[in-house]
Image: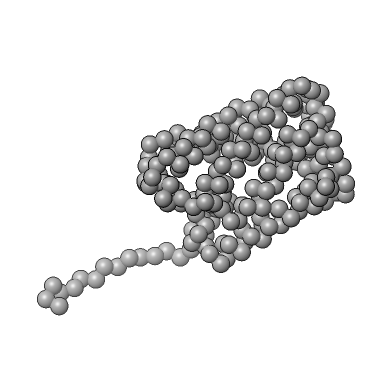
Amino acid sequence: MNNLLFGIYPYIAITVMILGSIARYERDPFTWKSKSSQILRKKQFVIGSVLFHVGVLFILMGHFVGLLTPIAVFDALGVSHSAKQVLAMTAGGIAGLMALAGGAILLHRRLTDPRIRANSTVADTGILILLLVQLVLGLLTIIVSMQHLDGHEMTKLMNWAQSIVYLKAGAAEHMADVNILFKLHIFLGLTIFLLFPFTRLVHMISAPVRYLWRPGYQIVRTKRNPAE
């Protein structure tokens, strides 16, 4: 089971995320949007959206750098495993609390405002709830990490992530005796990857690059005779 969840499932989730996103963009490009509800109710939206998106952005960058940077690089820079773990706990904790507060505000709007709720799909609400659960799990892992500040557990997670990304054998072995909270956090994260192309999360990877080479448009109004 460990090999299925942390050795095979990651590749299934990543493959579905990539191919599903490409297929959705090619087949239904007009669904590739976030469907902002700001026009329906601006109250709480700005503060909730800013907290959530800034927090998530910092979390993603932290995970990317922290998990995928080779351990040898940190050793060469003189950053100990313990110092790296404390930094990750501090920065990740702050960003996680920001994202959780913002996400809670956005979910409250979506559930309590009749107009927003009427314009929301099950996927819209469901993915937001999953993201909040993921944030809670991430914050709970900090409590586990505080019990051992030697960075040993984090090293296992780094080895697992790098084994998956760099296609190394035996990735699941690094997760065998990792705390259950880390396992749940990673499993739910992979599941969010799996669901990514079927939700509004796709707007995260959107960038208006086509505007750089798109030909210009000119709107011309014709004068018509009122008698016609």
Taking the image as drawn, is residue 73 in sight?
no
Q: Quadrant of residue 100?
A: top right
Q: Quadrant of residue 154?
A: top right
Q: What is the quadrant of the C terminus in the image?
A: bottom left
Give coordinates of residue 110: x percent, y percent: 45, 43
* Residue displayed at 81% across by 34% down: 178
Q: Is residue 77 left or right of residue 198?
A: right
* Residue displayed at 73% across by 34% down: 181
* Residue displayed at 64% across by 38% down: 134
* Colour scheme of the picture: one colour
Give coordinates of residue 46: x percent, y percent: 43, 37
Taking the image as drawn, is residue 199 in sight?
yes
Q: Is residue 23 left or right of residue 213?
A: right
Give coordinates of residue 165: x percent, y percent: 77, 48
* Residue displayed at 76% across by 35% down: 180
- Residue farthest along the bottom direction in this orientation: 228
Q: Quadrant of residue 147?
A: top right
Q: Is residue 212 above or below residue 130?
A: below
Give coordinates of residue 30: x percent, y percent: 48, 61
Q: Is residue 50 above or below residue 83?
A: below
Query: Looking at the image, how many numbered discs can be counted on the residues?
Result: 0
The residue lying toward the viewer, choosing from 202 and 107, is: 107
The residue lying toward the viewer, choosing from 57 and 217, is: 57
